[in-house]
Image: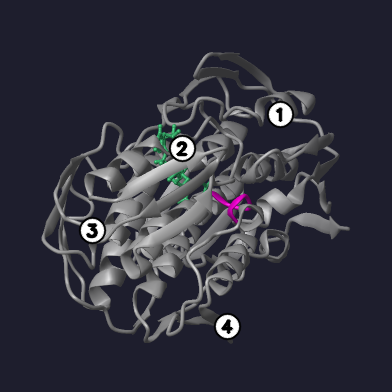
Amino acid sequence: MGKFVINGGKKLSGEVRVESAKNSVLPIMAGAILTSEQVVIKNCPKIHDVLSMAKILRSVGAKVRFENENLIIKADNLSGYTVCQELGKELRASVVMMGALISRLKKARLYYPGGCDIGLRPIDLHINSLKNLNVNVAESCGEIFCYTDRVKGRGIYLDFPSVGATENIMLSSVLCEGKTEIHNPAKEPEIVDLMNFLNSMGAKIYGAGTSTILIEGVKRLHGTEYQPAPDRIEAGTYLLATAITGGEVKINNCNVKNISPLIHKLCNNTCKISIKDDIIYLKSGREKKCFSFSTGPHPSFPTDLQPQAMALACVCEGVSVIEENVFETRFKHVPELIKMGADVTVKGRTAIVTGVPFLTGADVCANDLRAGAALVLAGLSAKGTTTVSGISHIERGYLDLDVKLKSLGADIKRQG
Ligand code: EPZ
């Protein structure tokens, strides 16, 4: 397991470019098997989760290869409908292969998905939705087997606006007879991205990003070349890295409206932010004021930026109150931040962060993707040296995080 060694105290400065969104690319890769024609995903980041998803697609017979920055997928001769347990455990997004395989082959076999250990993360909403679409689902010992003679469109209400369940419904109903309506769907930008991708293949989907999504089933989908949206969580991570080090950075390839809750918080936290087209320019203020927030489904503050924002709150003057309303145990970064001198008290889903003048370098461990990013940010600002182990978690979702931070002036080295 590799680690990052960071000598803190350097102010970040310069320019960095954000990649295509991990949480768009993964469901889009699943959607690529809905046609036998070639699909090109442009500027696809070679992050670990994408490589894992590529292995899953190959395991059912799709051809998948990188051609420079583009990912080329051709599912003209699918050979199976099973996502093996070993591959499925590597990432949560393996679960949306269920919808894609049902659409294409009317069968799917997979196992409970893996992914960040940030809560129970059941898939009841996925399974109940598929059953509503006339799909038979049998579960035993963690294995899920789905089959249907035909998927039938109908109205589905989600008790919780689950991102993955919304994606599975879209993928399983896009080629079916009739119309499907999703009520209370996830409104995340990645859902809009998946709709745009599928529509570029000839699908008829309307309303992603709103409280009702309509999917009119079509007979077939054709190939496409598609540029996914920029990664709003990566952009937010670099904004927070700049703020925590007191730096001044230009971030290219951003879709600002997708991270407005963070932008708003940072402006109030005495950062100066200016925006021009897809560029965000952040200049840190002299002092850092505390800020409170509650995470929630989009358009609330994104849960995927909660750990990184907490790292900043640890060195802000005053008391910040952070509520995590999406995942029940997404505070695994707290004990590690406390090792660095942070003052954080957790009560259920609420973390009370009392700012300290500075953090001190320590040996800490990344337990999941975003917690790992938070520890890197804390190390960038801490006095002394911080070693972050378990960086394979971080490399699942960030392309070249150390390289990009080094280009902004950080003293960070990868070891092992
Ligand atoms: C997606 O996970 C993202 N992952 C997560 O990003 C993100 O945090 C999450 O959406 C919320 O925005 C990918 O897109 C690959 P959910 P997903 O279904 O689909 C409960 C990252 O760091 N729930 O919206 O798993 C669930 O337990 C990752 O990039 C059920 O109860 O999120 C959770 O509490 C982490 N039953 C809540 O809903 C279900 O059937 C949100 O889950 C499904 C979900």
User: Does the magenta run of residues contain 91?
Assistant: yes
- Work out whether residue 133 or residue 332 is closer to the camera in this orientation and state it: 133
The amino acid sitting under disc 4 is: Arg
Compared to 87, does 157 lie above or below? above
Is 87 left, or right, of 319 in this rendering? Answer: right
Q: Tell me which numbered mark, 4 or 2, is placed earlier along the sequence.
A: 4
Q: In front of the other: label 1 or label 2?
A: 2
Q: Position of residue 139 (x, y in %)?
A: 46, 40
Are circles 2 and 3 on residues that touch, CB within 8 Å? Answer: no
Is the CB of the residue bearing disc 2 within 8 angstroms of ligand 1?
yes
Q: Residue at x 71, y 29 (%)?
A: 337
Marks 3 and 1, how far apart at CA: 48 Å
Q: In front of the other: label 3 or label 1?
A: 3
Q: Quadrant of ligand 1?
A: top left
Main SS of the magenta part reads loop
Is the CB of the residue bearing disc 1 within 8 angstroms of ligand 1?
no
State the residue position of label 1. 337
Work out whether residue 83 can be spotted: yes
Which picture quadrant has residue 137? top left
Image quadrant occupied by the C terminus: bottom right
Are there few (<14), some (14-19), or many (20+) residues within 10 Å of tag 2?
A: many
State the residue position of label 3. 151
Q: Tell me which numbered mark, 2 or 3, is placed earlier along the sequence.
A: 3
